[in-house]
Image (tube, rainbow, N blue to C red):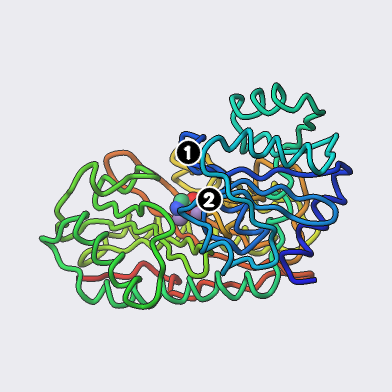
Amino acid sequence: MNNYENRRARLISSIGVDAFLVFDLDRILPRSIDHEGLFYLTGYTGEGALLICRDEAILLTDSRYLEQAGKEAPELILRHAEGDYLAEIAAVIQEKGIKRLAFASWRMTHFVVNKLRDITGIDLVIAADPVREMRAVKDTSEIELIRKATEISEEALGDLIEEIKPGMNEVGIAFRLGLLMKEKGAERTSFDMTVASGSNSSLPHYRPSLGRRTLAAGDLLLIDFGAVVGGYCSDMTRTFTVGKATSKQKDVYDWVLKATEGSLSKLRAGVLGQEVHQAAVDVIEHSPYKDYIFLSPVGHGVGLEVHELPRMGLDPGVLEPGMVVTIEPGIYIPGFGGVRIEDVAVVTEDGYKLLTSFPRDRLIEIG
Ligand code: GLY
Ligand code: MN
Ligand code: MN
């Protein structure tokens, strides 16, 4: 059994149905909504509908992808579905005698579910998103890809900060960082990155195209970015100053760093994500900046998607070895600016292993 066959067998036996349907098809859906699930279960990078049965897995796809599917996932049974995909899926369901079919309700539209129920009349079993849950714990090859994506990100950031000077524009910096990552082997950036200067840096998910601000001496500069390697994302943030830092900028930075250290001191398998979150909150609550504390979870899983399970501070579960999570506390002061530090760590039995190693023990002055 290869790795993908193993994942499919685990999935189908954990739900106790005849078959599980994974659906990622822009001919029917408004956009791709389970590209990651399809890839995780097959290694196939195109679109289609995957019907996982107990004895075999059938991929329905069209002429855009047939050759690609045969090359990337040769053990799948391929079925050509050019026109009416849903009728084609229904025909396979009938041929296989499937009576109970499960699907991820997080990843399926009401339209598709209703239509399939109408055509087939079978029992459709709603699961939340079991593949996403399986994906929370990574194996060593997945961790290696996230490590590589992080390494490329950090090398690119190292080159970028040598080039940054007052007068550069936020959009230009984002483009340059994206290019550097691609030159170093990234498939793409893992999300639309944040490059936020001056007072823009108090907006946690600022996009450079919103302000197109030009850097000035004395600015805070927050860069939140990542690369994709082998489908897996990195996600990290560093905050700098352009030229000399003020004592307040350094003080805010040092409190965020203490919050990072607080969370990391709790991070290990068996601990509730809420405890890791609370450790960072407790630090900033005792700082002069408690009114400007981050309100989102202190961290999240990262993998095929940049935001995955676990969501630390929201989900009730305990952390498990092999989870790959960010730790990203911040202080955001409107009009002054914000500081965030974001690292990525693998959870282990007795603690964690950081994948990020870009220096962060003090506020770095660049330009
Ligand atoms: N890049 C978005 C985040 O850090 O969660
Ligand atoms: Mn980030
Ligand atoms: Mn993040």
Question: Mark 2 packing: few (<14 Cα in 10 Å), some, or many (20+)?
Answer: many
Residue 320 coordinates in the image, percent (x, y): 77, 60
> Is residue 334 depicted above or below 220 in this figure?
above
On-image quarter of the C terminus? bottom left
> Is residue 332 depicted above or below 109 in this figure?
below
In this view, the residue in front, 147 or 23, is 23
Residue 354 coordinates in the image, percent (x, y): 59, 72
On-image quarter of the N terminus? bottom right
Residue 71 coordinates in the image, percent (x, y): 56, 69
Quadrant location of residue 265? bottom right
What is the three-letter code of the residue carrying label 2? Glu
- The residue at which mark 2 appears reads as 47
Q: Do the residues labelled 2 and 1 touch (CB within 8 Å)?
A: yes
In this view, the residue in front, 51 or 342, is 51
Element at badge 2?
loop
Element at badge 1?
loop
> Is residue 303 depicted above or below 93 in this figure?
below
Residue 267 coordinates in the image, percent (x, y): 69, 62
- The residue at which mark 1 appears reads as 27
Of mark 2 and mark 1, the one earlier in the sequence is 1
